[in-house]
Image (tube, rainbow, N blue to C red):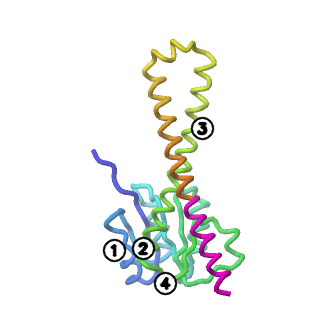
Amino acid sequence: MSEQPPLVLVVEDEPDLADLYAAWLGDEYRVRTAYGGHEALDQLDEADDEVDAILLDRRMPGLSGDEVLTAVRDRGIDCRVAMVTAVEPDFDILEMGFDDYLVKPVTSDTLRETVEGLLRRGEYDSEVQELFSLTSKKAMLESEKSASDLADNEEYQRLTDRITELREQADESRDAVATNDEDYEKLFQDFDTDA
């Protein structure tokens, strides 16, 4: 059985815009749309699949994106959230529990890159947790077992292979973050030279 693509919930009170975002993402991800805050929370409550990422409009009638975000975090829903909104960021965003913030209008490339980054962060977190757990187990085994016992044990070999794999993935994620940091740094350097 093949693994399903990640599930993205698009929450946007303008149906045409929500459907456009869904169309942009539909080739790579499973996408659900909610045309308001209450509908988003209903979908999250009823979801038989775990939502991996939410693209959330901040200013919506009824239940605002800020309120939806608070409810998502209060309910312990473990997913990454990007605010996609026409509201310019202010210092109030420092207290908000989102992972990324995009100001409309956004391009299809920007939206796809944002979702990719959100999902990568989610994987990185779980992979790091697994790496710590497995490394601890490996250290315990190495302190208790002889080198020949370890060398002859298939489970230990699988453990060391998995640790190697996780370290490589962590390195790739770190390199991707470093590349993004360099891009941001270059962007701000460009601003400095334009001034």
- Is 183 left, or right, of 9 in this rendering? right
Image coordinates for residue 51, horizontal then vertical, percent: 45, 59
Q: Counting residues from the N terminus, which is met first, the one under dot 2 or under dot 1?
A: 1
Badge nearest the viewer, 2 or 4: 2
Q: Nearer the viewer, residue 106 or 84?
A: 106
- Quote the CA–CA distance across marks 2 and 3: 34 Å
Which residue carries the number 3 mark?
132
Mark 3: secondary structure = helix
- Which residue occupies the foreground of this view, 103 or 17? 103
In the depicted structure, whether residue 102 falls above or below residue 4: below
Position of the C terminus, as image quadrant, is bottom right
Q: Which residue is mark 4?
A: 105
Q: Are marks 1 and 4 in contact (CB under 8 Å)?
A: no
What is the distance, in whole Å, between disc 2 and disc 1 at their CAs?
12 Å
Magenta stretch? 178-195
* Mark 3 Cα-neighbour bin, 10 Å: few <14, some 14–19, many ≥20: some
- Nearest-to-viewer mark from 2 and 1: 2
Above or below, 37 against 180 in this view is: below
Q: Residues within 10 Å of mark 1 (few under 14, many from 20)?
A: few
Q: Residue at (57%, 73%) from the top-left corner?
A: 101
**Circles 4 and 3 in contact, beta carbons < 8 Å:** no
**Marks 4/3: CA–CA distance:** 40 Å
36 is within the stretch colored magenta: no
Q: Position of residue 190 (x, y in %)?
A: 62, 79
Q: Which corner quadrant of the image does residue 64 belong to?
A: bottom right
Q: Residues within 10 Å of mark 2 (few under 14, many from 20)?
A: few
